[in-house]
Image (spheres, rainbow, N blue to C red):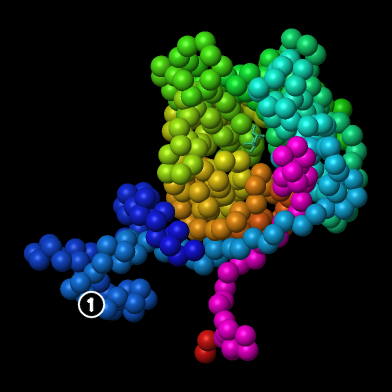
Amino acid sequence: MKNTLYSFLALGLSLVSASCSKQQTNQQTGKIQISDEEMDYLGITDREHVSAASLRALKWPKIGNEWFIEFSKPQPLKGDLAYEEGVVRRDPSAMIQENGLYYVWYSKSVGPTQGFAGDIEKDKVFPWDRCDIWYATSKDGITWKEEGIAVARGKKGAYDDRSVFTVEIMKHQGKYYLCYQTVKSPYMVRVKNQIGLAWADSPNGPWTKSAEPILSPADNGIWKGEEDNRFNVVKKGDFDSHKVHDPCIIPYKGKFYLYYKGEQMGEQITFGGRQIRHGVAIADNPLGPYVKSPYNPISNSGHEICVWPYKGGIAALITTDGPEKNTLQWAEDGINFEIMGSIKDAPHAIGLNRSADNEKEPTEILRWGLTHVYNNSNDQSIMRFTSNRVTKHVAKGENGKSK
Ligand code: AAL
């Protein structure tokens, strides 16, 4: 884990150095001044010979150990959300607790995924194609009862006529809001996903859908040629020129922050991963209009959005793609994120437990939650994860307590 920490801090050096370094440079000699305490803490041998790695360590922000956690292997759920052959249940929303029950919403589709090689009018091109949004309830977060469809695909010709999927829930002032991805037929490789919204007075619905999408991709990329190929571009455009994905709305500082993942036209593989970054769009009202922040993109890495309020700011789990993958980040203003910790084996597409006590410690909300796994190339099911703080490393029988 330390190696990961070193490399991401190297990449994020300019980000952290301005605000956090206690280390001084002597004006006359140009030498770095290191306190005895820093020498001891970082285990530096010789003040006159400080390696590049130690120089970076000297610039580390004063981050507490509470940002460092380990995740368990995902465990199957019971009841209706147990693995079912031929069925896709994936991308669980956060869970909210209502009348003693946990509620979760998710994408559901049936049948195998054919991909793009056949007849896209008839086929299912992705596991998340031809989905509706379903929901389930549970007393303990382990055994679930599937309650039915919450939001169905739209009528032919509507912006959401092909698939509605990857949903998030927000409860605000007694009302419930679902935001989710939408696709209009035909589902081609170059199709532009959008984001829809539905609202209700009860978590059981009925849900009213927005007549138009609340967010769309940037319109400044230019495809090259007519072939349905997303890698051929004249101009890539903004980080979200192709798709806006994984929406999650958080009430924050009297406004509504819609965090989302962007996919870019002409996407490349960089730093060993896809060019995926996150953005935010802000509204005065839950129903919008949502205006994209001029600071976008607000991450240089990541995949599915996983964000929660902490200490007056917003914390984020950054997974899967980009040089800062597998990090926990925090932004005092919800926009300018800094790396706080590194993690490994993060669950995908996390559904957070919104009833957790966020303020207890930064990762309290990650103690348990939902994720999805690929049972095979066609079927996916929702599972449960847990996590724990990394606080000791001791041999069997060793007394790990310090005096
Ligand atoms: C996921 C998410 C979005 C994508 C697809 C389903 O990992 O990023 O939800 O559209 O894959």
**Residue 40: quadrant of the picture:** bottom left
Q: Which residue is mark 1?
A: 46
**Residue 106: quadrant of the picture:** top right
Task: Name the side, left or right, on which 28 lies relative to 81.
Answer: left
**Residue 179: quadrant of the picture:** top right
394 over 278 or under it: above or below: below
Q: In percent of the image, x 35 and y 58: which residue is there?
A: 20
The image quadrant where one finds ligand 1 is top right
Badge 1 marks a residue whose secondary structure is: loop
Q: In percent of the image, x 39 and y 56: which residue is there?
A: 7
Q: Is residue 19 visible?
A: no
Q: Is residue 102 visible?
A: yes
Q: In percent of the image, x 86 and y 43: which residue is there?
A: 84
- Tell me residue 144's x, y (percent): 88, 49
Frontmost residue, 122 versus 26: 122
**Three-letter code, disc 1:** Asp
Task: Name the side, left or right, on which 240 lies relative to 305.
Answer: left
Q: Residue furthest front?
A: 117
Q: Badge 1: how crowded within 10 Å, few (<14), some, or many (20+)?
A: few
Region of the chain picked out in magenta, as a range: 372-401
On whether ligand 1 comes within 8 Å of the CB at mark 1, the answer is no
- Tell me residue 163's x, y (percent): 74, 24
Frontmost residue, 391 versus 33: 391
